Image (cartoon, rainbow, N blue to C red):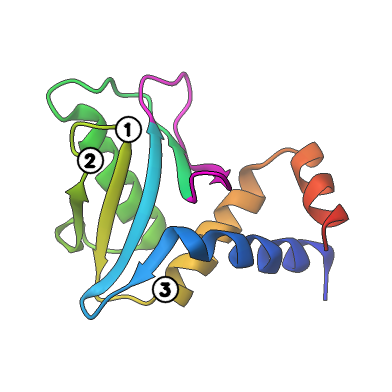
Amino acid sequence: MPQTEKMIEKMIEKIVSALTETGDGVIIEIDVTPGSKKKTVPSGYNEWRNRIEVKLTKPPVDGKANKELIDSLSDILSIPKKNLIIISGSTNSKKSVMVLHTTKDEIARILAERIVATTGPSTQDTLARYQ
């Protein structure tokens, strides 16, 4: 198994605790940093909070950051925006987003691949040590 695939598998093992499968789809626990210089979705995983980290460029004003979050998740997950619902935390940095008509395995794989692809070499080295 190539090194990158090992890192993805290790990341999947970690981030599944931020995902809950329901009868309707999957709930993703997210920790948003609005007003960042660069948009990164996802930007990492917070092991202590069991949340997927996301950096957004829009400010948390008039729902702008929430809209950017839904737009970004729709793009990376290839899911229509109508299938993404912020079920809690619409005015908070800690959000729960329902992704309708999908599975925990599908979401975990996509998010893990993105996290591994966007993290720097030092983060990847750290992950590799824990394999």
Gap between marks 2 and 3 measured at Cα: 21 Å
Mark 2, Cα crowd under 10 Å, few <14 / some 14-19 / many 20+, is some
Specify which label sits upstream in the sequence, 1 or 3. 1
The quadrant of the image that shows the C terminus is bottom right
| Residue 85 coordinates in the image, percent (x, y) | 18, 55
Task: Give yes or no for residue 67 being in the magenta stretch.
Answer: no
Q: Nearer the viewer, mark 1 or mark 3?
A: 1
Residue annotated with mark 2: 89
Task: Give yes or no for residue 38 being in the magenta stretch.
Answer: yes
User: Label 1 near label 2: C-beta < 8 Å?
Assistant: yes
Residue span colored magenta: 33-50
Residue annotated with mark 1: 93
View extreme (bottom): residue: 23
Q: Nearer the viewer, residue 90 or 114?
A: 90
Which quadrant of the view contains residue 23?
Answer: bottom left
User: The residue under label 1 is which amino acid type?
Assistant: Ser
Gap between marks 2 and 1 measured at Cα: 7 Å
37 left or right of 119? left
User: Label 3 near label 2: C-beta < 8 Å?
Assistant: no
